[in-house]
Amino acid sequence: MVYFAQNTNWKKLGKKKMCKLLFALDFEHFNQTGRFVTGIAYYAYDHGPYPRDEFNSISDNNSPEDVSKFLAIFPRSNYYDNDVEGYLIKAKDKVKFNKKIFTPREIEIMARLAEMWKDSSGEMIEQWSHGKNKPWDIVWNIEKRKYQIIDYTYAITEDSPLTKEEAEAMLKEEREFEAVFTH
């Protein structure tokens, strides 16, 4: 989140845009490697992929410490002086992005996404995330599983170096690893 907050136009970086950037990062990386970056669970919501478990708790005066330590979250209406709903996200002044915790591939994907969507609104990225046969579209429109988890294996495309079966096996292994080391 810090990388995107520091490398996109903060005046257009709300929760919706941040959600879509994280989703694009995770799913593009998964398509290339069979591994996600954040491990966030994304759900198919009306406005696209939504990391419900992480983002429902983010607001201007009640964000989790791991978010509020690095990012300022404030109502759009404070900035725009009108009744625009939602929040803007800005990296705090002395916060530094820690590139040591990311691989070169992850940083390359983040850089490309930040550049591509730098001045775009959340609504513009929402249109992209709703594209035909993209993961959100499959869950929301084709499978009719509204508000359900979007499986990472839906990121696998015909140009992926992995088959869907290989990706499923890698995802299963990753989840088993997490289960052992997070409890």
Image: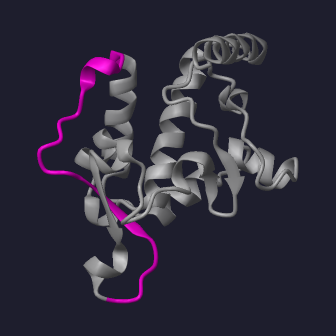
In the image, taking residue 147 as reference, residue 117 lies left or right, namely: left
Q: Main secondary structure of the magenta part?
A: loop
Residue 53 percent location from the top left of the image: 60, 47
Vertically, is 28 above or below 17?
A: above
Coloration of the structure image: one colour
Magenta-colored span = 82-104
Q: Please determine whether, in this image, residue 84 is positioned above or below residue 63.
A: below
- Figure quadrant of residue 80: bottom left
Outermost residue to the bottom: 82
Q: Considering only vertical position in the picture, is 153 above or below 60? A: above
Name the foreground residue: 129 vs 59. Answer: 59
131 to the left or right of 124:
right
Residue at 35%, 81% in the rendered image? 77
Q: Residue at horizontal 35%, vertical 59%?
A: 13
Q: Quadrant of the N terminus?
A: top left
Classify residue 83 by image quadrant: bottom left
Query: Where residue 98 sits: x, y (%)?
Result: 24, 27
Nearer to us in this view, 76 or 142: 76
Q: Residue 25: x and y, percent?
A: 48, 35
In the image, is residue 99 part of the stretch drawn in magenta? yes
Q: Residue at x 19, y 51 (%)?
A: 92
Q: Position of residue 121 (x, y in %)?
A: 41, 64
The residue sitting at 57% across, 36% down in the picture is: 40
State yes or no: residue 24 in magenta: no
Furthest residue in direction right, as rendered: 143
Q: Which corner quadrant of the image does residue 4 belong to?
A: top left
